[in-house]
């Protein structure tokens, strides 16, 4: 059939099963929005307050649902406003397709009004990107973009389409949704045999779980694997929920703000089984001193991750779900009772604790956990509140913590929360923010109100840039340079001004009551929680130190907590 390029875009989105997109219109993409208007009952469009919010919403939708998120933007600044969101998705291996429109083909490269080389700009932060210069290539390119975004190691793909391509008429042949198969890596028997030998020879194994286990959907296989090898489990920020946080073998998170138990256990282990991790610097600390007593067995879908940050003893390349199935079939049941008892001693000796009876970040997180019974979708911005959410909320299932792990994007959470709630409307979605992060994209509260997306926004308001201040306190001789907000911003009035409900709380009792009310309202609610500016995230590993050198305020003698 003969249709315009803009209609081709819409038809291809429908083929891919897309029923929700996030975006912001502009001149170059008007033809696409006109076609979208004709299909508004089939594809719902969420108009965000800013293109960055659209990119984060697509990302949050993808993380929560496991589907590909889609965002739209016009040329020039519209396209460049997507860049931070695309980079966030790239660093965390999140499948999104960003569709931008540019000036006409004849105007490309001439510094035309609102022209920018968005494919050149995003080349380092996309899995792949395209510019479509021929209308006959449009459908093929969009289909390919979705396939690339969700196969192998997932990631963002950008498709840039000149405006005249969207208006040209082209022959379109419908194609059913891309029923892709996961790339089948050949898992050789000798690779499995060597891994089994390493596991059977180990007396102090530890399982380290990363975001790849979430992407693979391998939670069932992972639990069976842990049962088989009888090992304690730790995870990265991105891996949370792949292995249940309420399992007795779970030690908590590893790394800079991981538990003492997890950091000590990995440092003492003789085998680290790393599943879908990239060995980030925030996880491993000093790479030359990471797990010095251990062999490292790595399982990953991306060969680039093998021997990148840590030299490994053996690696198995493939989809984690498939590799674990093979290992589970080959393994005999192992028992490490002395090692597990040693870990339990650490857990009893070094519990996570904080000052009771006052409104603090950990207290807020634990109250949220208790009231939601651990069944909410927790979204975070980046900073102290992010670490408290990782430490004190117990994630029982994958895809229930949405956070910017790799890029560390302040301003990520609210847009992502909107995407998650739209994708999973039956779930309670809570965005945890510091006041510094909330300021960056708080305009998306207006999006929540306008589109009737009932997210709960919790602000841990300490009137400072908390994590930066913590570093200034510990490592920069208390030089609080540009980290104190000396202004009169009132987040309750901001929320009310955008049409949401705003509630300020100053005590734990007030928070408990206000959060209970927020859960019952089914409306966008902003809770402004006043906490102390010098509350810190404990434990901590100093930059450049080994994770075995993890410390807390007791280790400092309380000198740095005032």
Image: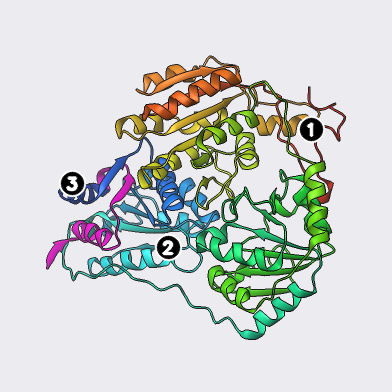
Q: Quadrant of the C terminus?
A: top right
Q: Is residue 187 left or right of residue 475?
A: left
Question: What's the CA distance linking mark 2 and mark 3?
Answer: 26 Å
Q: Do the residues labelled 1 and 2 touch (CB within 8 Å)?
A: no
Q: Nearer the viewer, residue 322 or 50?
A: 322
Q: Is residue 13 among what the camera can see?
A: yes
* In-front residue for pair 238/343: 343
Where residue 177 appears, as percent x and y from the top left, is: 29, 67
Could you give the CA–CA distance between mark 1 and mark 3, rounded to whole angstroms? 55 Å
Q: Mark 1 points at which residue?
A: 474
At x 40%, y 54%, the residue is: 117
Q: Judge by depth and name the residue closer to the eye, 384 or 251.
A: 251
Quarter-wise, where is residue 167 in the image? bottom left
- Give the residue number, with chain letter if any, for mark 2: 149
Q: Residue furthest left?
A: 2
The quadrant of the picture occupied by the N terminus is bottom left
């Amino acid at each position: 059939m003969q249709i315009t390029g803009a209609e081709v875009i819409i038809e291809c989105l429908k083929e891919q099963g897309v029923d929700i997109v996030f975006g912001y219109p502009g001149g170059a993409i008007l033809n696409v929005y006109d076609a979208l208007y004709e299909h508004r009952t089939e594809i719902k469009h969420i108009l965000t307050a800013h293109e960055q919010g659209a990119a984060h919403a697509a990302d949050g939708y993808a993380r929560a649902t496991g589907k590909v998120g889609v965002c739209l933007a016009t040329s020039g600044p519209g396209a460049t406003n997507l860049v931070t969101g695309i980079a966030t998705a790239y660093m965390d291996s999140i499948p999104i397709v960003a569709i931008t429109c540019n000036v006409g083909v004849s105007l490309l490269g001439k510094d035309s009004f609102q022209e920018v080389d968005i494919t050149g700009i995003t080349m380092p932060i996309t899995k792949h990107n395209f510019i479509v210069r021929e209308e006959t290539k449009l459908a093929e390119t969009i289909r390919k973009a979705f396939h690339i975004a969700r196969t192998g190691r997932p990631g963002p793909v950008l498709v840039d389409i000149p405006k005249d391509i969207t208006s040209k008429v082209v022959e379109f042949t419908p194609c059913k949704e891309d029923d892709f198969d996961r790339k089948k890596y050949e898992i050789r028997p000798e690779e499995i045999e060597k891994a089994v030998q390493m596991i059977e020879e180990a007396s102090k194994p530890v399982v380290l779980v990363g975001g790849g286990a979430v992407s693979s959907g391998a939670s069932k296989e992972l639990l069976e694997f842990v049962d088989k090898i009888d090992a304690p489990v730790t995870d990265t920020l991105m891996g949370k929920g792949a292995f249940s946080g309420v399992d007795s073998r779970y030690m908590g998170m590893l790394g800079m703000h991981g538990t003492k138990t997890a950091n000590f256990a990995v440092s003492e282990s003789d085998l680290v089984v790393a599943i879908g991790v990239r060995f980030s610097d925030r996880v491993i600390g000093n790479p030359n001193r990471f797990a010095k007593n251990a062999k490292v067995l790595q399982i990953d879908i991306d060969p680039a991750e093998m021997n990148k940050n840590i030299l490994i003893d053996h690696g198995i390349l493939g989809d984690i779900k498939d590799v674990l199935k093979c290992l589970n079939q080959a393994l005999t049941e192992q028992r490490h009772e002395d090692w597990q008892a040693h870990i339990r001693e650490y857990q009893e000796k070094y519990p996570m604790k904080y000052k009771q009876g006052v409104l603090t970040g950990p207290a807020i997180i634990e109250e949220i956990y208790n009231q939601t019974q651990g069944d909410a979708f927790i979204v975070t911005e980046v900073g102290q509140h992010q670490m408290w959410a990782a430490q004190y909320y117990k994630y029982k299932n994958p895809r229930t913590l949405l956070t910017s792990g790799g890029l560390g994007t302040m301003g990520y959470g609210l847009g992502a929360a909107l995407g998650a709630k739209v994708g999973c409307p039956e779930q309670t979605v809570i965005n945890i923010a510091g006041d510094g992060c909330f300021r960056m994209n708080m305009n998306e509260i207006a999006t929540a109100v306008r589109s009737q997306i009932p997210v709960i926004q919790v602000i841990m308001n300490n009137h400072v840039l908390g994590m930066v201040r913590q570093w200034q306190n510990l490592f920069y001789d208390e030089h609080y340079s540009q980290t104190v907000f000396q202004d009169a911003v009132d987040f309750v009035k901001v929320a009310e001004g955008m049409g949401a409900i705003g509630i300020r709380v100053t005590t734990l009792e007030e928070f408990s009551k206000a959060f209970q009310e927020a859960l019952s309202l089914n409306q966008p609610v902003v809770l402004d929680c006043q906490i102390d500016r010098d509350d810190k995230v404990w434990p901590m590993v100093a930059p450049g130190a080994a994770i075995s050198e993890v410390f807390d305020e007791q280790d400092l003698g309380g000198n740095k907590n005032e």
